[in-house]
Image: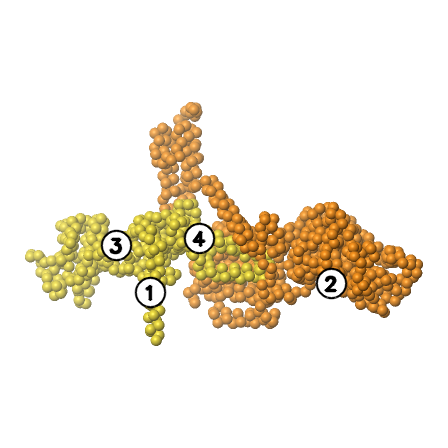
Amino acid sequence: MRAGSLALHKRFRSHGHRLREGVIRWVTRRHRDDGSEVTLGRDRIYILPTRAGYTLLAILGVMLLGAINYSNNMAFLLTFLLVGIGHNAIWYTHRNLLGLKVSALPATPTFAGQPLTISLRLADTRGRDREALHLRIGGYTSEPVAVPARGQQTASLTLPALGRGIYHLPRQRLDTRYPLGILSAWTWLGLNTEILVYPQPVDPGAAHAGPGDEADAQRRQDASTPDHIRPYRPGDPPGRILWKALARTGKLHIRETVAGGRDTLWIDWSAMPASDTETRLSMLCHQILAAEAEGRAWGLRLPDQTLPPGQGPAQRERGLRALAEFRFEPIPLPIKESTTGTKK
Amino acid sequence: MNRAGRTHSPELRGLELALLALPVAALPHAWHQPPWVTLLVAAAVLLRTWLHLRDRNPPSLGVMALLAAFAGGLTFLQYGTLFGQEAGTALLLVMMALKLLETRNRRDIVIGLFLGYFVVVTTYFFDQSLLIAAWSLLSAWLLTAALIQVHAGRTLQRRHLARQSGWMIVHALPFMLILFVAFPRVQGPLWGDPQRDEVATTALSGELNPGDIAELLQDQTTAMRVQFHGPVPPPRGQYWRALVMTDFDGRRWQAEGGESSIELPEPGDLDEVVAYTATLEPTRVRYLPVLDYPVSLPDNAEYRDNHQVVRDRRIVNRIQYEAEADLAHPPGSDDALSRTAREQALELPPSAAPRARAEVALWRATHGDDDRAIIQAALDRFAAAPYRYTLQPPTLEGDATDEFLFETQAGYCEHYASAFAVLMRSAGIPTRVVTGYQGGEWMQRGEYLRLRNADAHAWNEVWLDGEGWIRVDPTAAIAPERIEAGIGGLTGGEGESVPDFLRRDGLGWMQQLRFGLEDWRDFARFRWESWVLAFDPERQRELFARFGLDATDWRHIVTALGVGFGLLAVAAVAWSVWRRPRRPRDVADRLLVRLSRRIERQHAGLGRQAHEPVVTWTRRVKAARPDLAPIVDTFAERYNQARFAPVRDDDRAEHLTALRRLAASDLRKPDADPPLPRTN
């Protein structure tokens, strides 16, 4: 019985959610894609009373009834003064968003498993201080942001870790209840920015090392000697063969020492001692980071593309991006859409 | 629970201001509430402040529930109820204090502040003075500032908050005025009888008992104020009729409401008609004081057959009404006196005043049928010593009339009016007692007459066939100065004291100053009361009528509101358009203009064109005046930093300082060349 009603409740909620989503989609149909920067105009700022607003309205209703009942003119005056203040709060709250220039800042790429920070830049263009602006994405809300007159400020939101991939920002909501909290003005933004999540680096050696090898791996890491794994080539010293990897994949791999140094390192998809895509990407990622830390030129071979050898931040970025994009169609950030919107 | 109680948590931002605003809002109640309510509010505020400063949590929910029950119980014990004006207000204050005490988060503060607005409005149950209005504005200002701080998301500067809140209130004022004037008013009450507990506050009770002490004369509160729409009649002519008393039991006179209403008499000479607007303080009775003799009345008042004016309902709020009087047109002059009316006006208890009757019998023997001579005889008797006018007469023990006439021979208007009526009735002349106001002070500043409760007066009307009810004021015989100069004109003879506030003779400069101030104060009070407090459905109807609108027709109300808000919107738009270009766009911009102008003055044509980018301009300046390169280059860089770079406030301030210095720097050529002559 209980479970049944709960399921029903859930169904209604999901219906409500879908309906709400549909309405928002319809309302924002002209602003679905805002590019990277948008100035908030009247056509996209919405405003409604908050719960506190309805409470105040009820209190004012009681005051008005009292004023009429007691024919008390000062009570009329105060009630109407508060009505005036409440009415003007519509302008004040609306104005807090109007003319604000919002631009999406490029998101700093993260590695899978690390929290993700999304930032929008808010700039005033009308010479007015802006207070208490909240950025909401999904169910997540930023700290309140204040923008000085003709200045700018960054609104940042930290989202929980995601899997590897390339994403774009889902619909954003910028809202404010300043100054009185009785009204909430908001806008939906379709700012576009690309969010890269690189694979979580996994040391190919450590990944397949048994418990006994862990101390060994630790020691190697302490000595800060990055490792490179590549398929066995005739002439390689047998002492460097990774026997455990052989046991798992049936192919010979060797660990290359650092000192070897000057020649180009090829980081190769097919050379990774793992069978599933994500683990391989993680290992490739580790290899790229290791090569960069070492300051060595490297190239990347993936099944569908090859990155020519190079070195430096640009090369690193290209490589990691290739990993993030690998067999992945850009999708909106898969974060839960909040149903209440008040979660902090 | 521990989590929410932290000081300086963003949730409690604004609590400090709420802890200031709420006591300010509640302060006026201290004069009207039992001391324990005041103490409880003060204790809650202090305790919450202490907890906040010491970073402690508010009391637990259990303790709060106990406190709430205790405070509710106290209120119930005090008033026997939790509803109604007094008890409801006490309960509201107590609950506001407890809400403040238990504040844990933003929502609690917001509810506390909303209650604060409510606390302000309940003040008006007890006091509607101008001072309270000013205090309410202060309270609303602080409460709104607290509300802004709560929602600001950061701690705002006090000055910023003050300005923001102040502007919100200023912007709401026109709104308030429009709604106040045009919001459809209905005559209250909607339920219950709000004033049922309160007793009549007028000086004019329905009874007159000359044995009582002169308590009334000490009452300096205002009874009514009158503005004349033409020449002001002389004090001697100003009798404000309120109650007519015919029924006498030998000691006490009683007023009746009259049996039916009658037509008002036509004014005799239209030029002589005195038109006026009276503002009457609430009396909680129905009688309306009008200037003798009324010829026109407000619509909701009627003229009764005993010649008193009665309103359709009790006067529980300050009201304003317009009426007209013909000073020389006594009531009844066109009719004969009915049999019953004559009998009533002659009635005397058989045992009453035997000595007075004997005296009157002598007068009758002397003067025969001449009623006027009898009246004169009575007045002469009063005018002769040892009768004296005093505000502190001895109380009368036996037959009040005889004792006064023959023994104590000291009294004020009521004594004389009562005794005179008994004398006349003994002589067979129909007589009644009329009470109302007489005298008053002329207020220079606002050009109106102020009648205090101390100006209450009693006089007589006698019936003379063919002439009607003729006014006879026996007090004028014994103390003419009371009639000529008001009650303040009396000088207390023989060590008697007239209360200070009534005296107007032989004043030093201090008192002159005091009366001058009083003149102003009463003027402000009067304006407040007549323009604001007396505005009711009737005044609204009159005001609407002046614009050709009907306040009872909702379409006209909508029109008025629409026009009002339309004008307001136009004014708002005009204001913003007028303001925008005048406001300096930016300090850096202004400094750029200054520098450009100074360079232009040195070197015509080198000033920056309106839409010339700063970089292009500096290049042009450098080409013509290489010596200015350091100045314009630094300026351009700082300017770009200050205007376009994402900078902190401190850095920006530093840039601006540098820009200011640069804009004021010496622009002359470094070599000893004389300044260039102006070429165009």
**Identity, as a three-letter code, of the amino acid under mark 4:** Thr
Q: The orange chain is which one?
A: B
The residue that appears at 89% across and 62% down in the rendered structure is: B360
Q: How far apart are marks 2 and 4 (CA)?
A: 62 Å
Tell me if B346 is positioned left or right of B258 in this view.
right
Chain hosting mark 1: A
Mark 2 = which residue? B258
For marks 3 and 1, give the CA distance. Answer: 30 Å
Give the residue type that dot 2 points to: Gly
Q: Mark 3 points at which residue?
A: A196
Which quarter of the rendered picture does the C terminus of chain B lie within?
top left
Mark 2 crowd level (few <14, some 14–19, many ≥20, 10 Å Cα): some
Q: Name which residue lies at 9% across and 58% down.
A: A232
Nearest to the eye among marks 2 and 4: give it: 2
Q: Residue at the location (89% across, 57% down)?
A: B370
Q: Which residue lies furthest to the left in this view?
A: A234
Q: Colour of chain A?
A: yellow
